[in-house]
Amino acid sequence: MRLKLFGLFFVLCTIPYVMTLNYTAVMLDYGIIIEPLKTVSGPLELIKTYKDGSNPDIQPIRDLSHMIDIFLSNYINENTVSLFHNLILLAFIAFLLFRNFLLIGIEKKTAYLLIAIVLSHPATFHIFIEFTARKHILSFLFAQLSFYFYLKSKFQVKKDYLKSLFFYLLS
């Protein structure tokens, strides 16, 4: 019975994310972040914009993520692509959170509840609907990956300290 309630609570927390796929994403820094990327044809040209100073906001992973959205927006609505991309990243974050909670010894039911709380938090939802806040989602994703590999190396035989450090630096 409790597991059904947790499942229902988890589904209710994710409904706002799915419903917003029909609405326009918030694009506060669209002209600063996205517009310069529309003129870039690939990763090498992106690096050139960093070197010549035409793109002062140097965040290559975020920019590559947005370049994928720009490429896919040729075939699908740009708003839907960006929100769906954010939804995929948040689903991966939820999975990593679940794995991390299990690695530190939290029960499954409690882990589901904690993930539901994280997903239902207004700050998480705001980051999801704001297209240009992808850097926050990616930072949280890489921090969780770093923590996952750290816990894995701490509690298991396989040593993944370098992977943990790598993802920490990316975050």
Image: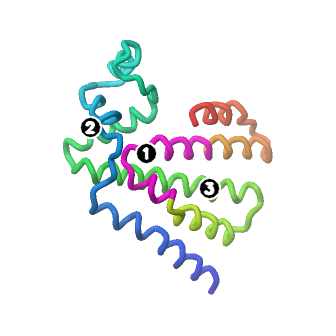
Look at the picture and state if 123 lies above or below 73. Answer: below
Picture quadrant where residue 101 is located: bottom right
Give the residues drawn in magenta, as a range: 123-144
**Residue furthest to the front:** 28
In percent of width and height, residue 164 lies at 67, 36
In percent of the image, x 46 and y 30: which residue is there?
59
- Of pointers 1 and 2, the one earlier in the residue sequence: 2
The residue carrying mark 1 is: 133
Is residue 41 shown left or right of residue 139?
left
Mark nearer the N terminus (3 vs 2): 2
For the residues labelled 1 and 2, the Cα–Cα distance comes to: 19 Å
Percent position (x, y) of residue 22?
27, 63
Check disc 3 and report its element: helix, strand or loop.
Answer: helix
Q: Which is nearer the eye, 3 or 24?
A: 24
Q: Mark 3 points at which residue?
A: 97
Residue 88: percent from the left, percent from the top?
A: 43, 53
Crowding near the residue tagged with mark 3, few <14, some 14–19, many ≥20 C-alpha atoms within 10 Å: many
Instruction: Classify mark 2: residues with Cα within 10 Å, few (<14), some (14-19) or many (20+).
Output: some
Query: Which amino acid, mark 3?
Result: Leu
The residue lying at 46 percent from left, 67 percent from top is 14
Which numbered disc covers residue 71? 2
Give the image's coloring scheme.
rainbow
- The quarter in which the C terminus is drawn is top right
**The disc label shown at residue 62, or none:** none
Does the segment drawn in magenta span residue 141? Answer: yes
Looking at the magenta stretch, what is its main secondary structure? helix
Return the residue found at the far top. Answer: 52
In magenta stretch: residue 36: no
Q: Secondary structure beneath disc 2?
A: helix
Task: Classify 100 as above or below 29.
Answer: below
Of callouts 3 and 1, the N-terminal one: 3
> Rounded to the nearest whole Å, what is the CA distance between mark 3 and mark 1?
20 Å
